[in-house]
Image (cartoon, rainbow, N blue to C red):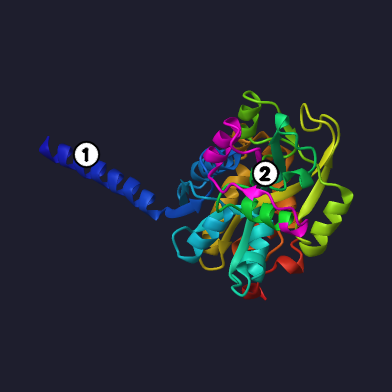
Amino acid sequence: MKTKQAVIGIASLCAALAIASAAQAADRIAFGTTALKSVHYTYAAAAGKAINEHSADKVQVTVISTGGAVDNLNRIGRGQIDMGLGTYATIYQAYKGIGKFEGNPMEKLRGLWVHAPALQAWVVREDAGIETLEDLAGKPFTPGQRGSATEQLGIQMLEALQIEPELFRASLADAVAAVKDNRSIGYVKAGGTAVLDGTTLELMAFTPIRLLSFSAGQVATIKEKFPFINFQDYADDEVRDFPAFTSPVQVIGQFALSDSLTDDQVIAILEGIVDNPEPQVSAFPSFGKLDVMQDSVDLITIPLHAGAVKFYRSRGIEVPERLVPPEMQ
């Protein structure tokens, strides 16, 4: 009897050790994202869930709320996160060492996948009397959440157009509160594909808003100085309840460094993203409108991580030479 109990005990111990060993075998990945209230944090959390469900034996992703793309670039440079979320306009500038990153190129930056060609809405209170971008001059206005890629791009566009609001630099929560209290007339916030951010939809229930439109001349002026900034024309009611307008579009996705993730880790991450779309679509419906592999190859503007190149090629996607990183050449 004691022998049988001993055998059972040893078997139980071996099973426990096997489970523990499997858990330890999964590499822990720190994923820097954005503010908790952002729709892109919602997506990132769902992406982490998709990866962890599908690739639990290989990687375990921990989603970390941060200040956005610029904060994530700083954190990944310090080794505090393994991959990050951001707009590819900002990632491109960091890679090239231009704009805010002048003289400090991050040449190891590598692309992973994209999840949103996102509307960048320029939101103002309807009762503020602001009808054009020029009307922002001298008025309190938040160009984007402090430290975020949206803020950086907003300031660049205002400078290109020589429009000088009274900049109200704030977190997303504080920016929205200031608009509600009429201490600020508006802010810039990225949403989804032809969809406003959740915080802006909540604001609409509190006070009527207007979305500012960019003229053809303003678009040309901005693109002459910042060719990496893209714009999109929206028809009447294409963004629900708003008339036709033209607005910047941010391509938002994930990035790493060439050496912050291994090829095998990237492949496991992308397997979770591509093969387990349900959590992502449930949390971020516009993700379902993407062909995530082909759109990533079409929209990413810096070299891919070597693991991403291997993954996309293995799934039959043609990777253009411009996306093949130096370490693979």
Q: Residue 296: where, in percent of width, then height?
A: 71, 53
Looking at the picture, which amino acid does disc 1 mark? Ile
Viewer-proximal residue among 18 and 193: 193
Identify which residue is drawn at 61% across, 28% down: 202
For the C terminus, which image quadrant? Answer: bottom right
**What element does badge 2 sit on?**
loop
Q: Quadrant of residue 263?
A: bottom right
Q: Which residues are magenta?
A: 159-187
For the N terminus, which image quadrant? Answer: top left
Rendered image: mark on residue 326? none
Which residue lies under the disc numbered 1?
Answer: 8
Viewer-proximal residue among 190 and 158: 158
Q: Quadrant of residue 307?
A: bottom right
- Callout 2 crowding tier (Cα within 10 Å): few <14, some 14–19, many ≥20: some
Viewer-proximal residue among 267 and 2: 267
Instruction: Work out whether residue 314 can be spotted.
Output: no
Looking at the picture, which amino acid does disc 2 mark? Lys
Q: Quadrant of residue 278?
A: top right
Identify which residue is drawn at 62% across, 47% down: 144
Q: Residue 110: where, in percent of width, then height?
A: 61, 64
First along the sequence among labels 1 and 2: 1
Compared to residue 154, the image places residue 135 above or below, namely: above
Instruction: Work out whether residue 322 can be spotted.
Output: yes
Compared to residue 67, the image places residue 39 above or below, namely: above
Q: Is residue 172 magenta?
A: yes
Task: Measure the alpha-carbon separation of dots 1 and 2.
Answer: 75 Å
**What element does badge 1 sit on?**
helix
Which residue lies under the disc numbered 2?
Answer: 139
In the picture as drawn, the residue positioned furthest to the top comes out as 205
Identify which residue is drawn at 69% across, 35% down: 196
In the picture as drawn, the residue positioned furthest to the left comes out as 2
